[in-house]
Amino acid sequence: MIPALRPTTMHGRFIAPISAVCLAVLATTTGTARAEVLKVGDRLAELDVATDASGKPVKLKAWKGKWVVVTVGADWCKPCAKELPTWDKLAGDADLKRKVVFVAVDIDDDLEVGKKFHDKLKLKNMVRVYMPSDKSGVAGNYGSDHMPSTFVADDKGVVRLVREGFEIGDADGEYKKFKDSLDKLVK
């Protein structure tokens, strides 16, 4: 806890202004360490410590030339448990399947927890990826502070759509809204 600043003197000078400047510098420098969440127009951040279920590294550049949907979730995220099966169903759509790769990135710190989460949800159309947030330098770029977060990137890796959250009680409505958005983007 920082004590309230009082204009006190040291050798006849006020030290409160100096303290205020130090606090401002501290607040500014600590804020820069935080990752910026991707937004429309940004390039997708390459997955840094991501692996598949067998431990093989996964990189987004493997799908260069295709549209990519990256959705980030975790076992402890209740809306993620509704969103992932909905996006998995969408990933199975024949028209989209030819043009879009759906990637489910689990950021649980324990890989086994993430694998069990994906297994429990019976994901079969999405690429399953595990990227522990405690080891990743890019998890914050993918909205790990606000989940679920979904990013749609074009065939050049540029983000064209960002979705945050999921209306738990309206999976069919969310499916339709997202499908409509993808149909407009991916022609």
Image: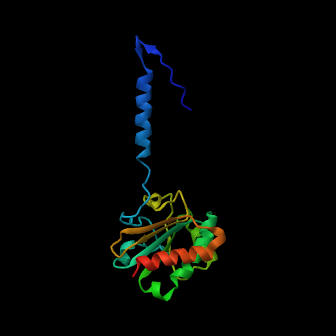
28 above or below 59? above
Q: How is the image coloured?
A: rainbow
Residue 101 visible, this angle: no
What is the x, y in percent for residue 4? 54, 26
Q: Residue furthest bottom?
A: 94
Q: Residue furthest right?
A: 169
What is the x, y in percent for residue 174? 58, 73
Q: Residue furthest top?
A: 12
Residue 89 visible, this angle: yes
Locate the C terminus by quadrant: bottom left
- Please name whichever residue, 62 or 159, is drawn nearer the observer in this view of the structure: 159
Q: Which residue does the image show at 43% across and 14% down from the upper left?
A: 10
Q: Quadrant of residue 40?
A: bottom left
What is the x, y in percent for residue 111? 55, 67
Locate the N terminus by quadrant: top right
- Please name whichever residue, 131 or 8, is drawn nearer the observer in this view of the structure: 8
How many numbered badges does the structure rendering display? Answer: 0
Residue 109 located left or right of residue 78: left
What is the x, y in percent for residue 43? 35, 65
Q: Which residue does the image show at 43% across and 80% down from the upper left?
A: 100
66 above or below 78? below
28 above or below 129? above
- Please name whichever residue, 148 or 1, is drawn nearer the observer in this view of the structure: 148
Residue 115 located left or right of residue 56: right
Q: Which residue does the image show at 45% across and 32% down from the upper left?
A: 23
Residue 34 located left or right of residue 125: left
